[in-house]
Every structure is written in structure tokens, then in C-alpha cells.
Amino acid sequence: MRNRILTILFLAINLTLFGQKSKDCYEIKYLDFFGLDKMETIKWPESELDGLSKMDFAKDRGQSEIKTNFIIPMIVYQLKEYHPSCNKNIDTSYFNKISEIYLKIREIDSTEFLQKSIAEKIDFLRTDFYSQVENIDYLPKMTTTFDDGPFYGVDYKKESELKPSKTQETEFGTLVISKADDKTILTSKDKNENIIWRKAITGLLDRNLTELHFTENPMEYNSVATVAHMYSEGERFTLYLKNDGSFMYYFHSW
């Protein structure tokens, strides 16, 4: 299974450069979360696009935590190239193929979709993309990573004050790392020092992670999330929060 996913990832990142179009001709939100907002428009070479078209994406269902949904943002950010407001010479053959791949991944029946104009098709795909990004259950599956996760930790509800071992200022307040009951505790506080959430940090097989540290300049902010880049037990640890500091999920490198 891992070899198959690696093949898909190779196909997904082996892309060919387009000419860049004006960013104002058709808005697609949330691409900054996936690191695609500042990239020039690129597409898959024809031979590799055919390989993606032949993939049976349904095989991933229930068999792997690594989902092919991570291909979806890579398709969506190409859509601007095919919108009539951005391009008058549209490669409909290529657009039809990436649309087919999108619908296969999402298991959406294409009957009604095929009756739409190309602008209506792009609007449909954009709306469906937004619905996934705004759903916490889908968002981790759309992230390109081979780290373990997503993980959600264990709520730590003891009322006693914890001694901080490390702190990190954020736009919403503070992240605080503590040790208690042989557990690594991570706390999110607002600017008034009120606790937003507090969790014992666990990893694969629900084991307690023994340590947690912030990287240098760890905080990243985008339209979807506040991201804290950290490390635990010598491996990458990436924490995703809502922009008000509320908990979303995290990944831990294997």
C-alpha cells in the first residue's frame, strides 16, 4: 500500500509549468494552507495524467491513513487556468481529465456535472473544495504528509496549575508545554491567560510522547489555520489550530 501511495505522490508532484495568469481573474480561497497560493500554475505531463486517471482511488478507503484526497488541492489550484475569465484558449481535454480525477477521488457521480458549462463545472469543484477545507474531518486527509496522524491527544482536566517548561507567544495568546503525571501536557491560552484547551500529547498506538519542543520561529499563519512547528523525540511534530487558538489536530513524524 505504501508503495502505491508513493507512486501517487510522485505523479502528483511531477508537474510541468504553465504561463502564470492574473490572480484576480478567478478567486480560489484557502490555497495558502496547502502552500499553493504563490506557485505559478503548473500541470501534470500528459503521460502521468493518464496514470492518475487509471488509479482506483477507492482502494484507499479503510486501508490506509494516507488518503488520495491530498491530490485535490493540486487539482483545484489549476482550475483558474481553465476559467473563461482567465483564459480564452482552454485545453478542454486536460480540464476534462483533471475533473474526472477529482470526481473519482470524491466518489461524485458525473452525470449532472457533464451537463454544465466549463465555468459552472469550475464553480462546482471550487464549492466542493471549500466544503472539505471547512470540515475538520476532511482537512487532515487533504494535507500532503507521510507523518503519522492525525492525532488528537487526550484532554487533561486536572485543575491544578502546571509549571511551564516552555512557552510560545502566538497571535491568539500563548502555547505552554508542561510535564505532569509522567505526561507531556500542551496548553493553549488566550491573551487573558484563560485556558482554551489542555491536552496530554500522545502519538502512535496512544503512547505518551516524552518531550515536546518548539522550533525556531515556529508559528505560521494562513487563511485556514494557525500552525505550530515543533518536534518531539527527535521527530517533526506539526500542530494545527484554528486562528482563535482552538484545537484541530497534529501530526508526528515516523
Image: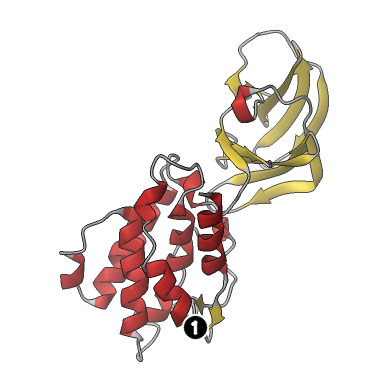
Q: Quadrant of residue 233?
A: top right
Q: Which image quadrant is residue 52 in?
A: bottom left
- Where 224 sits versus 30, above or below? above
Q: Residue at x 66, y 29 (%)?
A: 188
Q: Quadrant of the C terminus?
A: top right
Report the colour scheme.
secondary structure
Number of marks present in the image shown: 1
Q: Going 61% across and 23% down the picture, which residue do you hit? A: 206
Q: Secondary structure at mark 1?
A: loop
Q: Where does residue 156 sit, x and y in percent of width and height?
A: 62, 16
| Residue shown at the point (49%, 83%) measured from the top left | 21
Residue name at image x 57 percent, y 38 percent: 149
Q: Where is 40 relative to 102, above or below? A: below
Q: Is residue 77 left or right of residue 194?
A: left
Label 1 sits on what residue type?
A: Lys
Is residue 18 rendered to the left or right of residue 191?
left
| Residue 84 at least partly seen | no
**Does 8 sit above or below residue 50?**
above
Direction from residue 243 to residue 46 in the image, left or right = left
Residue 50, horizontal then vertical, whole percent: 40, 74
Residue topped by disc 1: 21
Q: Position of residue 152 (x, y in %)?
A: 56, 29
Q: How many residues crowd around disc 1 within 10 Å: few (fewer than 14), some, or many (20 or more)?
A: some
